[in-house]
């Protein structure tokens, strides 16, 4: 990835992605006391991805984690999610957006869908 691509992604993230992920984190912070929702927005011009993660607070459930990852991919953005207990934890492509179509509302929608899917797919024995 070139520095120019990283710089446009950083500008896009500061304008659209950061606020969206922070918003979804705030909406879901107390959804389930056994899980922590966190955004990872360490802004840096050299950073090529941002993510929202959900992690089990139980030491006996280390695989009960998931994340939605928004990553620069040339002149577009890919959105992937993964669940630690599903598909061997491998990322699944959810969407690929032209940079002109990356909006705060679109990222909010994708992140909310991820959170809902995480809790829907969570194994019954992990829902304490």
Image (spheres, rainbow, N blue to C red):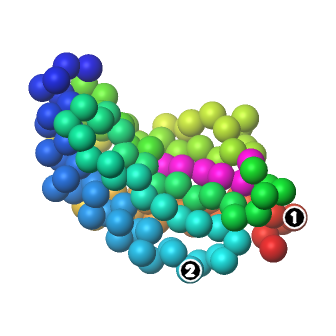
Residue 5's x, y, as percent? 18, 28
Sequence-first tag of 2 and 1: 2
Q: Residue at 31% of width from left, 28% of height from top? A: 73
Magenta region includes residue 93:
no
Q: Identify the disc placed on residue 125.
A: 1
Residue 110's x, y, as percent? 42, 57
Magenta region includes residue 65:
yes
Judge by depth and name the residue closer to the eye, 110 or 57: 57
Above or below — where is 21 with respect to 78? below
Indicate left or right for 38 with 65 as reference: left
Q: In which quarter of the image is residue 33?
A: bottom right
Q: Select label 2 or label 1 by which is in front.
A: 2
Q: Quadrant of residue 18?
A: bottom left
Q: Residue at 63% of width from left, 34% of height from top? A: 90
State the extent of the magenta-drawn residues as a range. Answer: 63-68
In this orientation, does residue 111 appear? yes
Name the residue that disc number 2 marks.
30
**SS at circle 1:** helix
Above or below — where is 19 with respect to 49? below
Name the main secondary structure of what is drawn in magenta: strand
């Amino acid at each position: 990835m070139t520095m120019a691509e990283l710089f446009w992604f950083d500008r896009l993230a500061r304008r659209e992605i950061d606020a969206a992920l922070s918003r979804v984190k705030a909406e879901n912070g107390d959804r389930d006391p056994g899980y922590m929702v966190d955004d990872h927005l360490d802004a840096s011009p050299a950073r090529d991805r941002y993510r929202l993660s959900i992690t089990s607070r139980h030491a006996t459930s280390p695989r009960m984690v998931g994340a939605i990852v928004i990553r620069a991919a040339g002149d577009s953005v890919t959105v992937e999610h993964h669940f630690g207990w599903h598909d061997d934890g491998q990322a699944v492509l959810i969407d690929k957006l032209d940079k002109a179509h990356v909006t705060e509302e679109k990222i909010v929608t994708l992140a909310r869908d991820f959170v809902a899917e995480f809790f829907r797919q969570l194994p019954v024995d992990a829902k304490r």
